[in-house]
Amino acid sequence: MKNVCVFCGSSPGSRPEYTETARNLGVSLVKFGIGLVYGGANVGTMGTIARSVLEAGGKVTGIIPRHLAEKEVAFTDLSDLRIVDSMHQRKALMEQMSDGFIALPGGLGTIEEFFEVWTWAQLNMHQKPCGLLNVCQYYDKLLEFLDHTVTQQFVENDHRRMIIVESEPITLIERFRAYHPPVTDKAKWALKMNINHK
């Protein structure tokens, strides 16, 4: 595992634990010799994790759309800052460069980016681990909803279990390193569900 992509907020959030965990995750990545790929901003928990990796002597790759870079939120001190033309290009490059994906507490962008890479894993477009750092139970209600999607037979249980959930960075990284993707076929599962309902 050479690089992990971390989705996180342009805001620090309301609790000091969010910033503290972003900092700890950055230091933990460096301890395991893993580089950081992230959204390229210098604000919020995005800026916190990038600075923590740099201060610990690690490698950071920032990927930011041009329209955001022009608003002066880009982390211009990075040695590897990639400016792309769109959000779509940003996410595609993040996926290509990363061996796993972690979401810290964040807003709509964080959740959307995480759900996209998890959907790609569900569709066997990649076999990389996807995890949530559930700081201060931030994602509890989201996880409860995802369990509901399984009971309502819109999501296969094996796909739901793909998401690795931990509250501590080192534990999450260790589970990433031991990850083996489930052998699933969404098309066959969907066909089975439709047959069962006829």
Image (cartoon, helix red, strand yellow):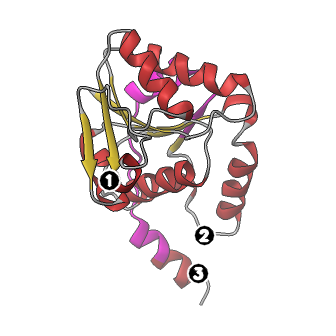
Quarter of the image for residue 15 reads top right
Graded by Cα atoms within 10 Å as few (under 14), some (14 to 19) or many (20 or more), the crowding at tag 1 reads some
- Residue at position x 32%, y 53% in the image: 66
Q: Which mark is residue 179?
A: none
- Residue at position x 40%, y 57% in the image: 184
Rendered location of residue 77, percent (x, y): 32, 25
Rendered location of residue 120, percent (x, y): 38, 58
Q: Quadrant of the C terminus?
A: bottom right
Q: Nearer the viewer, residue 129 or 93?
A: 93
Residue 36 on the magenta segment: no
Q: Is the Cβ of the residue at disc 3 closer than 8 Å to that at disc 1?
A: no
Q: Which residue is mark 3?
A: 196
| Magenta-highlighted residues | 164-190
How many angstroms separate mark 3 from mark 2 (CA)? 13 Å
Rendered location of residue 32, percent (x, y): 36, 14
Q: Which residue is mark 1?
A: 66
Going by the numbered disc 3, the residue's amino acid type is: Asn
User: What secondary structure is found at the residue carrying circle 1?
Assistant: helix
Graded by Cα atoms within 10 Å as few (under 14), some (14 to 19) or many (20 or more), the crowding at tag 2 reads few
Going by the numbered disc 1, the residue's amino acid type is: Arg
How many angstroms separate mark 3 from mark 1 (CA)? 48 Å
Position of residue 144 relative to residue 194, above or below, is above
Q: Quadrant of the N terminus?
A: top left
Q: Which residue is mark 2?
A: 154
How many angstroms separate mark 1 from mark 2 (CA)? 37 Å
